[in-house]
Amino acid sequence: MILVGQGSQLSREALSTLQAQTYPRSLIDVLLHGEPPSGGSELADLLDELEVSVVGDGRSAGEAADGEVLVFLGADSLHSPRSLEAHVRWHESVSDAVVLGQRCEIAPAPGADAVGLVHALSEDRGGDLVAELSERPEPWQKAHLERTRDLADGGADVFMVGLGGNHSMRGETFRAVGGHRVAAGNDSHGLELAYRLAAFGAVFVLEREAVSWRVVDELRPPDGEDGPKNAPELVDRVALGGLRPTGRGRIFATPAVAVTFSVVDEPAEVVAAAVDTALGGRLSDLAVRLEVADGYTDRAFLERSFASDPRVSITGQDAPSELGACAYQVLFPPSAVPDTMTFQDIYDVVTEEPLGALYVTVPGRPAGEAVVRVFLTGALARSRRVAADENVEVEPVIAELFGERWISGVEVGVRDWREPEPRLADQGPLASNPELVRERARAAREKARAEQAKASAERERAEARDQRARTKAAEAESEDAAARAEEAEAEAAAERAKRRKAADRLDAVQRSRTYRLARLMSRSSAVARRRMRRRRSS
């Protein structure tokens, strides 16, 4: 367990809620980043009892932690008794899960005991102990959760909900992505780390049973922003999520697209021209890697050509890629070359619909010989791990888990460098190669079918959203009806109790001695009156 925040924010109440966790205490190590807190002997006793270790040697608490599971919690918050248990159970079944707990702000009523309040809130009680209670997701975070059905739908930008001060992951996952890199003050929502976790292929999970309450004197209103604040560090390192400005020419630390050209025996001039086309194209947010086969005679020429451009790297075919944090990976086969719109067109396709893989055929070449492969980096990373565990090929796994699509290279301007570039006119393509003409016709048909399928999917999603809305409305109406029925039943029960009480009182009166004597005297008086009437009449 890692407490996020300064030691001065740590309170006795926060430590007491950690002490009350249902997860076995013997399996928990507690680390606090920063200076140790100063809060008297009672706080010191709690720190000793929980064996809290303070990390202040320039490392983050995450770097210092060696636990199997790392749970990051706010040092200034109270935590539900089952928080740790709820976090850990996900990691026992999903090795690359990132679990996000629920965060709230709470203003306790005057005199309310904080620890008792946490237990009451965990059991859906505590109304008399709370002055104000509010969930802390900002409006843009709530909208993201609704759009992704509480992260169940995934997608390339699933990470955009952020991390915050209540999340967990396995220690090996944290170390694999490189831990924290951006200061918390510049990334209050943890988006940069969340982005790298998404590129790693982590599975984001929302766990509402893991709740943290930050105690405040008065609730602050949401910031009202449409999205997180675009700190320069985030713009530079987070390639998805709409943080970056639109336009061309700017270079970022983490490019959105990593393009790999496989070089086998193509003329160096052709390879250099393809790289120049990629770098000078409509999409400038990319980096290029040349995978040069062993024995390629013109490697030195390529190295000299791009020695001064930091966007281009040249490696052997077996060298590991250093572009793993890019959002998308584009792998060009030998002999395939792009035009200036190719990567923008590809980027538009993969960002318009959730896909794990996009395959682009090269006109005039059999699909088995030449295909441009485009992968969502996170989908590819996770599929590789699953394929390795099951000892199967990667591409069927990515198709099953994330979906795939095939399009023709004509749609995105991909061709074989040995084929002449198609000639265009106002009336349409006039390419002399009949194969290209037939390829264009097939591409047009495939594009029409894809658009129809997309429209159908949009209708189905709209119907599903409407159905969910109707279901929620029906559930709300049912709950209201149930509440009204319970209220009516309570009133009826109260009326029945009132009647029983009145009947009991009457029965008690009737059974009393005084009542019996009064009835006897009443009867004797009636007999005497009848006798007097008979005497008078005689």
Image (tube, rainbow, N blue to C red):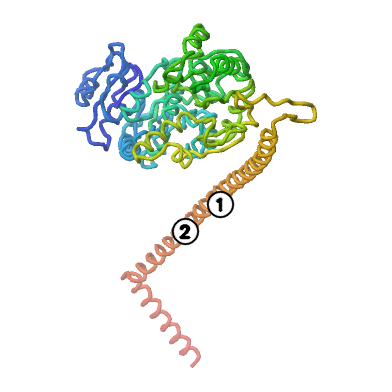
User: Is residue 81 visible in the rendered structure shown here?
Assistant: no
The image quarter containing residue 208 is: top left
SS of the residue under disc 2: helix
Q: Residue at x 58, y 49 (%)?
A: 467
Is 78 located above or below residue 178 in the figure?
below
The image quarter containing residue 91 is: top left
Left or right: residue 287 versus residue 392 is: right
Q: Which of the two residues, 153 or 55, is positioned nearer the viewer here?
A: 153
Q: Which of the two residues, 477 or 509, is positioned nearer the viewer here?
A: 477
The image quarter containing residue 426 is: top right
Q: Residues within 10 Å of mark 2 (few under 14, many from 20)?
A: few
On the image, the x and y values in percent for residue 429 come to 74, 30
Q: Residue at x 57, y 13 (%)?
A: 250
Mark sitting earlier along the chain (2/1): 1
Quarter occupied by the N terminus: top left
Q: Residue at x 36, y 42 (%)?
A: 123
On the image, the x and y values in percent for residue 395 come to 46, 37
Q: Residue at x 40, y 37 (%)?
A: 207
Left or right: residue 389 versus residue 238 is: left
Amino acid type indicated by mark 1: Ala
- What whole-number distance in Å separates the C-alpha atoms at marks 2 and 1? 22 Å
On the image, the x and y values in percent for residue 333 come to 52, 27
Q: Which of the two residues, 536 or 354, is positioned nearer the viewer here?
A: 354
Q: How many marks?
A: 2
Left or right: residue 348 versus residue 510 is: right
Taking the view exactly as shown, the residue that stands out farthest to the bottom is 538
On the image, the x and y values in percent for residue 358 come to 54, 34
Amino acid type indicated by mark 2: Glu
Q: Which mark is drawn over residue 474?
A: 1
Q: Which mark is drawn over residue 278?
A: none
Q: Which residue is mark 2?
A: 489
